[in-house]
Each structure stands twice: as structure tokens, then as C-alpha cells.
Image (cartoon, rainbow, N blue to C red):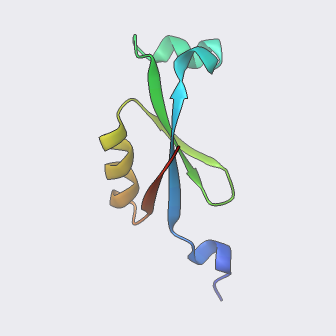
Amino acid sequence: MMTSQSADRTVYVKTIDVIDLPREVREQAEGLEQIYAVHDSAGQQLALVGDRKLAFALAREHDYAPVLVH
């Protein structure tokens, strides 16, 4: 039986300023000023990517419906 949370295939794409990230992550950002975090409906971070289009493509590739968070 599916719970309502497991049936929710919406993910949220949020812009993150690299400067606000932990040092280890900043070092991997390769000079980017912003990256994109993908979160599920419970708020769990699923991915960090360097490009908005990639964030949306990655979500869709895994059968999620991405929504941009402002």
C-alpha cells in the first residue's frame, strides 16, 4: 500500500548561494556562485547540481515533477 508521501512525486528546486554552503561543498562548486538543491516534499535534500536545467532534467529522469522554489 502506498502512503500519500510516497505517492507524491513533486520535488523542489531551490537556488543556493555557494558562500552559504559548508567549506567541503564550496570547494567542489568549481567557481560557481550559485548551485541548485533538489528536495523532496519532506524537505530531504536529494541532489546538489550546478545548473538549473540539469536539476530539472535530473528530476524528470527519475520520474519526479520539479517545481522551482523562490
Residue 2 percent location from the top left of the image:
63, 84
Q: Quadrant of the N terminus?
A: bottom right
Residue 59 percent location from the top left of the image:
40, 55
Residue 12 percent location from the top left of the image:
53, 52
**The image quarter in which residue 40 lies:** bottom right
Q: Residue at x 67, y 51 (%)?
A: 43
Could you tell whether 6 is left or right of 51 in the image?
right
Q: Residue furthest front?
A: 70
In this rendering, the count of numbered labels is 0
Q: Nearer the viewer, residue 59 or 13?
A: 13
Residue 48 percent location from the top left of the image:
49, 35
Q: Residue furthest bottom?
A: 1
Residue 62 in the image: above or below residue 30: below
Residue 61 in the image: above or below residue 39: below
Q: Residue at x 51, y 69 (%)?
A: 9
Q: Residue at x 46, y 23 (%)?
A: 34
Q: Nearer the viewer, residue 43 or 2?
A: 43
Q: Residue at x 35, y 33 (%)?
A: 51
Residue 2 in the image: above or below residue 35: below
